[in-house]
Image (spheres, rainbow, N blue to C red):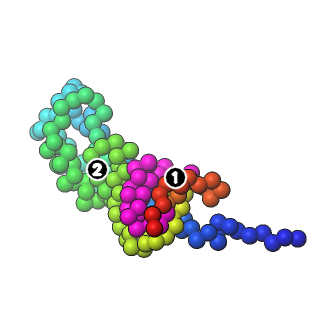
Amino acid sequence: MEEIVNKVAQSGLLEINLEDYYPKGERVVFDMKEHLFQGLILKEKDFRAFVKSEDWNKYKDKYVALVCTVDAVVPTWAYMLLVTVIEPVAKKVVFGDLGMLETVIFMDALGRLNPADFTDKKIFIKGCGRLPVPESAYVEITRILRPVAKSIMYGEACSTVPLYKRRE
């Protein structure tokens, strides 16, 4: 009987699974529409009273996206004021929807990578997975690794797409 050889393991490829960088924690949206007078305008006095009286601990250790899902003029200072009370308890606060929140979270996580750790490596970036990794994370990891990697591929071990190969 012939011995089974794991050619992927012998290939010298370094697999990167972006799911390994997926920050754990609940993602929530704070929608300004709930605080608009007649769904149109923000009343400063009422909003400041709300900010002062609200229990912001409900955002403890959560990732928070600040957004307004209706067509209304919300002054910039209102979002800034929210950050002053949510940021001290939350893991992260961003302006934007959940997609923007995921992008920012991943940019933070990938920004902690040391590109030198990947110098002259043949890198395989794993594709499909269980977690919602944004496309922006795949773009960012490629941007970080391209200057140092020997080669970059994407996909699954059985079916990779070559993306980059350094010219020698």
User: Closest to the observer: 48 or 129?
Assistant: 129
Rendered image quadrant of residue 9: bottom right
User: As displayed, is residue 110 above or below residue 51?
Assistant: below
The residue depicted at 29 percent of the width and 59 percent of the height is 89
Question: Which residue is most to the right?
Answer: 1
Q: Are marks 1 and 2 in contact (CB under 8 Å)?
A: no
Residue type at mark 1 is: Leu
Mark toward the start of the polypeptide (1 vs 2):
2
What SS does tag 2 mark? strand
Task: Give the number of the disc on residue 32.
Answer: none
* Residue bearing mark 2: 94
Q: Is residue 23 visible?
A: no
Task: Give the number of the disc on residue 131.
Answer: 1
The stretch of residues the image draws in magenta is: 127-151
Rendered image quadrant of residue 116: bottom left
What SS does tag 1 mark? loop
User: As displayed, is residue 165 above or below residue 161?
Assistant: below
